[in-house]
Amino acid sequence: MITKRLPENSEGIAEAARILKAGGIVAIPTETVYGLAADARNVAAVEKVFVAKGRPQDNPLIVHISDIEMLRTVAADIPKEAYRLAERFWPGPLTMVLPRDESIPACVSAGLSTVAVRMPSHEIAHNIIKESGLPLAAPSANVSGSPSPTKATHVLEDLDGKIDAVVMSGDCAVGVESTVVTLCTVPPRLLRPGGVTVDELKEVLPTLAVDPAVLAEPEEGKPVASPGMKYKHYSPKSDVIMVCGEGFADFVNSKPDCGALCFSEEAGDIDCPHVVYGSEKNPETLAEGLFSALREADTLGADTVYAHAPKTDGVGLAVYNRLIRAAGFKVMEL
Ligand code: TXA
Ligand code: MG
């Protein structure tokens, strides 16, 4: 298959909508990461997404909508908290897990009775949903297990020849995937940290619980609330080890033949090949740079890459959550 490169203008949006309505799959930019979109009501189209990504069948997809009326067509028994969250955080990087409306086929949600829904703020994503008139099921547009794409070139690295088209837009502003919160449990529970922080969510959901899998490895054999959390993720081909604490530059300088993923503040003190992923003082830059830096880490030629862990407050929690998965939960304290 030849993957069409679509421009990020009205023609590109119209062509993307046309392909989606015909049951094709198209990578589209969002404010978090690029998503691989399909008509959420078309089982054959949704199956193409699983095949192109090599995604396990038991990992459900997020449904993307353009307005609140569409929410009522994909979810059922919507609680009032959902509307309060929508008012505060939509459009934006928040996904809510709600009871699934029967118009959304079970395969979208990997057989669960729930559906994850998000209203992206990215103008192109919004316009493609609106123009097609379809709720779009869209996981991140990477091959399963590799870092999520924050640039159109990342999508092509992974999926060129396997999908109908990609909208060639710019870099994603947030850089890590959306915050996922379920309203189907009491109390509501954070399943995946992201651009919307725990403190912000608690302003609307004071009883919010944080799933233990956010910061640690899910226990073997135990069911997980969000199936995506059990998979090794975001992995470059090198072996990544996450390193917490002070003295990172001295530590990597003492190791032979390694690579490093580091903060801009310490890069000048590091002797081995390294990639900067952002500033320690500004976790938003770490989120924005992380996935691109993980891909770049593979070009360092190091068997082992030590990655300096961020602090876990604010957006740092989302960065820490992605990095610990990229490291396959291998963590060292300095
Ligand atoms: O920012 C994002 O969320 C991006 C962009 C494209 O919107 N999408 C994204 O999708 O990250 P994906 O498929 O890579 O991650 C979806 C996550 C997975 O961890 C999945 O297990 C969880 O959401 N999820 C989806 N539906 C769910 C459900 N019904 N219940 C619990 N977790 C669910
Ligand atoms: Mg993903």
Image (spheres, rainbow, N blue to C red):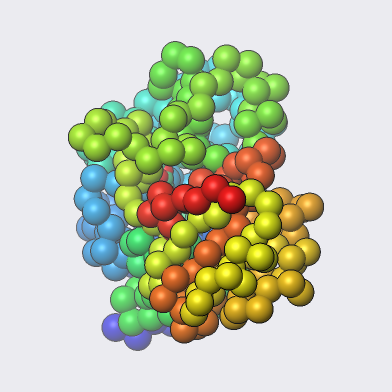
- Residue 112 visible in the shown view: no
Nearest the viewer among 61 and 76 is 61
Q: Quadrant of residue 12?
A: bottom right
Give the residue drawn at x 31%, y 76%: 162
Give the residue drawn at x 69%, y 39%: 314
Q: Pinpoint residue 66: horizontal percent, then vertical percent.
A: 56, 46
**Quadrant where the N terminus lies?**
bottom left
Q: Pinpoint residue 43: horizontal percent, then vertical percent.
A: 24, 52
In this view, 163 is above or below 109: below
Q: Pinpoint residue 325: horizontal percent, then vertical percent.
A: 43, 52
Nearest the viewer among 167 and 111 is 111
Judge left or right: residue 7 versus residue 173.
left
In this view, 314 is above or below 9: above
> Total marks drawn?
0
Judge left or right: residue 109 versus residue 116.
left
Give the residue drawn at x 51%, y 21%: 209
- Residue 211 visible in the shown view: yes
Give the residue drawn at x 59%, y 50%: 334
Nearest the viewer among 63 and 33 is 33
Q: Pinpoint residue 92: horizontal percent, then vertical percent.
A: 64, 44
Judge left or right: residue 69 versus residue 54.
right
